[in-house]
Image (cartoon, helix red, strand yellow):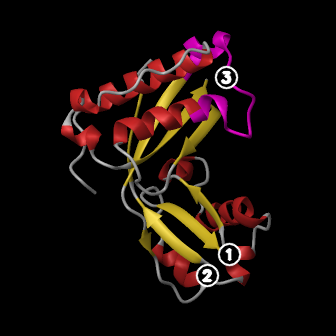
Amino acid sequence: MPEPLTDGEQRLLLQLARESIELAVWGKKLPKLNLNSFPQALQANRASFVTLTIQDQLRGCIGALEAYQPLAEDVREHAVAAALQDPRFPPVVKDELNRIKIEVSVLSAPQALPYESSEDLIKKIKPHVDGVILKHGERKATFLPQVWQKIPNPQEFMNRLSYKLIGRENFWRETKLQVFTYQVEEFQELN
């Protein structure tokens, strides 16, 4: 992982996410970002996920697994997408804005995890530390490390991730998949 973000940089990203969501929900155009006004760490290409919750219930989560744009842009883009384009939920409406809590996860670069068998894979994955990506052909599915809080059992974690990937819980046991792990720096609004 690169250097952790400072508290100020984290607050700046949360503020950027909040402002972007509010503008988008109100149907206003987002202004062009002046990247030079941001700290260097937020100008670097990094991948992020933005998660929205209301009373600890998921309300939207969108992100990228690999860096392709400056972190400030990445967080802004995924904040708006989590609010308006997560296919699992209707778009966020104005009445929800003051109840939404924003969480940002900044990802390390995914690393391939070689393994011999499903038992070997379970031994190599680090619960509560690793985010996991399963890849089969063109399909990919991931769970952020935070998902371990809700699914602490490694076999169940992999079953649910396998179901997310292909609609079958035991697929990860029956088929040799490409597996990648990553870690996150996670921070959220305090309210």
Q: Tell me where residue 182 appears, x and y as whole percent.
A: 42, 61
Disc 3: which residue: 92
Q: Residues within 10 Å of mark 1 (few under 14, many from 20)?
A: many
- Amino acid carrying mark 3 in the image: Val
Quadrant position of residue 134? bottom right
Kindly report the distance in space between the C-alpha atoms of the residues bearing marks 3 and 1: 34 Å
Decide: few, some or many residues near mark 2? Use Cα within 10 Å; few <14, some 14-19, many ≥20.
some
| 45 shown above or below 98 | below
Magenta-drawn segment: 81-100
Q: Which residue is mark 1?
A: 172
Q: Is residue 177 above or below residue 90?
A: below
Could you give the CA–CA distance between mark 2 and mark 1, rounded to whole angstroms?
7 Å
On the image, which quarter does residue 126 sit in?
bottom left
For mark 2, give the secondary structure: helix
Looking at the image, is mark 2 or mark 1 earlier in the sequence?
Answer: 2
Labels 3, 2: front one: 3
Is residue 56 among the parts visible in the rendering?
Answer: no
Q: Residue at x 46, y 66 (%)?
A: 181
Residue under label 2, please give it.
118
Identify the secondary structure beneath mark 1: helix
Q: In front of the other: label 2 or label 1? A: 1
Residue at the location (56% across, 12% down)? 98
Foreground residue among 107 and 127: 107
Q: Are the two marked residues, 2 and 1, in contact with CB atoms closer than 8 angstroms?
A: yes
Of marks 3 and 1, which one's residue comes earlier in the chain?
3
Callout 3 touching callout 1 (CB < 8 Å): no
Earlier in the chain: of badge 3 and badge 2, it is: 3
Task: Tell me the quadrant of the picture where the C terminus can be found.
Answer: top left
Query: Is residue 89 within the magenta segment?
Result: yes
